[in-house]
Image (spheres, helix red, strand yellow):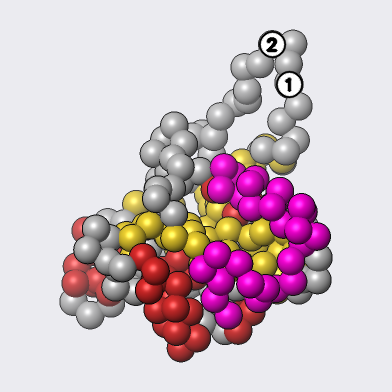
Amino acid sequence: MTVLDASQHARGLAGEPELLSSAGRPALGVEIAVVDEAGLPVALGEAGEVITRGDHVMAGYYNPGVRTDLSKAVRDGWLHTGDLGRLDAEGNLWLVDRKGDMIIRGGYNIHPREVEDVVAEVAGVHEVAVVGVDDADWGQRVVALVTAQPDADPTALPDAIAAHCRDRLASYKKPKEVRVVPELPLNSTGKIAKKDLKAPLNAEAGAAGAAPAGGAGPGAAS
């Protein structure tokens, strides 16, 4: 869909480093837009769902007798990717997160990747996944699951992460709980399987009556 060309790499290396984190501009014959829930374009720099159209977009699913309705993925010729991104005035695209991973806490939208990037800065953190867990008071609460570096003290990580997040994140974005786990589950493409992480946490929250935000728990952090 996009290309970050040689001239943009040169600009990035010459003093515009943010360009190097961009996915680039639309490739030849590709159209890209970023839209809100109603399918309307958002303002430049604002995050929304990335949609695309052109000859590169699939004609449809081959699912004989199972599903022929493409309305959820392709509408008016536009493929809705399920990715959240933002565009700048030059048409450069930055990917922000997956739409299905977004956390909604008390009416605020939280992009897990933003929180993950901050948690990953803490010494001793090997991997991190941030998910939204059901919460009776706020809709969802932010939970961070991390694996520790071999030479790190896992018992010290929750407090270190909480202290770091207090300085770097708005209050509503901070993890309300940090859990150190032996490993994070992966899906068939090698990405962290967040659905597999969320299911037992939501079941646990339901069994406990959806513990209030900031409630105590293993490795809880406020």
Q: Which mark is residue 37?
A: none
> Which residue is located at x 63 percent, y 23 percent?
61
> Which residue is located at x 74 percent, y 71 percent?
212
Residue 79 placement (x, y as % from top left) = 61, 41
Q: Which mark is residue 64?
A: 2
Q: Nearer the viewer, residue 4 or 173?
A: 173
Is 174 located above or below residue 20 in the figure? below
Report how far apart the C-alphas of labels 2 and 1 lie in the structure: 7 Å
Q: Which residue is mark 1?
A: 68
Is 104 located above or below residue 100 in the figure? below
Q: Report which quarter residue 10 is drawn in.
A: bottom left
Q: Quadrant of the C terminus?
A: bottom right
Please identify the residue farthest to the bottom as the structure is shown. Answer: 167
Q: Locate residue 157 relative to residue 210 in the image: left or right.
A: left
Q: Locate residue 42 relative to residue 146 in the image: left or right.
A: right
Q: Which residues are magenta?
A: 195-222
Residue 209 placement (x, y as % from top left) = 80, 60
